[in-house]
Image (cartoon, grey):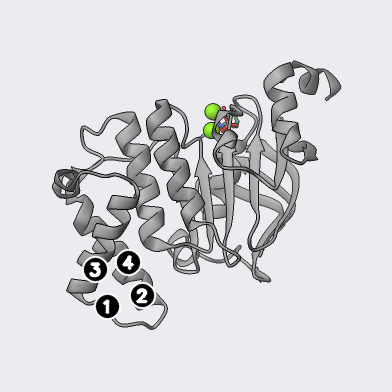
Amino acid sequence: MLSIQNLHASIGDKEILKGINIEVKAGEVHAIMGPNGSGKSTLSAVIAGNENYEVTDGAVFLDGEDLADLAPEERAHKGVFLSFQYPVEIPGVSVTNFMKTAINETRKANGQAEMPANEMLKVIREKSELLEIDRKFLSRSLNEGFSGGEKKRNEIFQMAMLEPKLAILDETDSGLDIDALRIVANGVNKLKSEKNAIIVITHYQRLLDYIVPDFVHVLYNGKIVKSGGKELAYELEEKGYDWIKAEN
Ligand code: ADP
Ligand code: MG
Ligand code: MG
């Protein structure tokens, strides 16, 4: 589904990604771990099409299609969803209205009619219950005054509503207490299917107790320096990142 081939990306004249190769098949969960400043957020931003980064070599393919010439919203319409490490606040736009717009824009881009209002309400109710989101929360301005945990839970709510083909969660676990972590992980696990894939970016192993990855990759200094199964996450938890740094 997702094929990242020899991806190099820079910001200004600073090269941040230095030749990344990852293959993600439908039905798989991949975790990307690594110390701060390794390029994890950069990798997710480049996949999502953030135009602040320049791809200087290599490519990202989604279902065989080179994403290079697609704008972020076109990638989103093709089913790429990125949950941000630092979600933005949008005063004056309620959670519900944001969600309605996101869903209907996606449908329109894919040649589908708008979702009927009653169906929309039903889906919003179902998904908010799944993520244990209070109904009052839905009429608040998007992310404005939300706690760290509420922002993250709201990101997963968006993901549950949009049912993306490829979901990338960038440190969704940071700032979550254990209950919120479990709720978020439950939401992700319920979304998981044979038709979609999930990339979980995390600094810590903790989230991976709840969202069990098929593959773990360690990103360090812009390169994947190690890949393995879920046991690699436990090894990192136990030994930290210093040995990775020493080996590279
Ligand atoms: P991680 O998510 O693994 O902590 P990032 O992708 O955020 O790493 O950052 C990787 C490197 O790129 C860091 O050295 C960071 O300082 C640098 N970087 C990221 N974004 C920018 C930017 N907008 N301008 C300059 N440097 C940046
Ligand atoms: Mg960081
Ligand atoms: Mg980051």
| Circle 4/circle 2 CB separation < 8 Å | yes
How many marks can you see? Answer: 4
Q: Which mark is residue 107?
A: 2
Q: CA distance from mark 4 to mark 1?
A: 8 Å
Q: Looking at the image, is 1 positioned above or below residue 205?
A: below
Q: Which residue is mark 3?
A: 120
Residue drawn at x 22%, y 51% is: 95
| Badge 1 element | loop
User: Ligand 3 closer than 8 Å to the CB at disc 3?
Assistant: no
Residue drawn at x 36%, y 75% is: 107
Q: Nearer the viewer, mark 4 or mark 3?
A: 3
User: Ligand 3 closer than 8 Å to the CB at disc 2?
Assistant: no
Q: Which badge, 4 or 3, is on the more N-terminal residue? A: 4
| Residue 235: image location, x then y, percent | 75, 25
Q: Which badge, 1 or 2, is on the more N-terminal residue? A: 2
| Circle 1/circle 2 CB separation < 8 Å | yes
Q: Which mark is residue 114?
A: 1
| Circle 4/circle 3 CB separation < 8 Å | yes
Q: Looking at the image, is 80 positioned above or below residue 175?
A: below
Residue drawn at x 41%, y 54% is: 159
Q: CA distance from mark 4 to mark 2?
A: 6 Å
| Residue 226 seen in the current view | yes
Q: Nearer the viewer, mark 1 or mark 3?
A: 3
Residue drawn at x 78%, y 23% is: 244
Amino acid type of the residue tagged 4 in the rendering = Ile
| Badge 2 element | helix
Looking at the image, residue 1 sits to the left or right of residue 117; the answer is right
Q: Which residue is mark 4?
A: 103
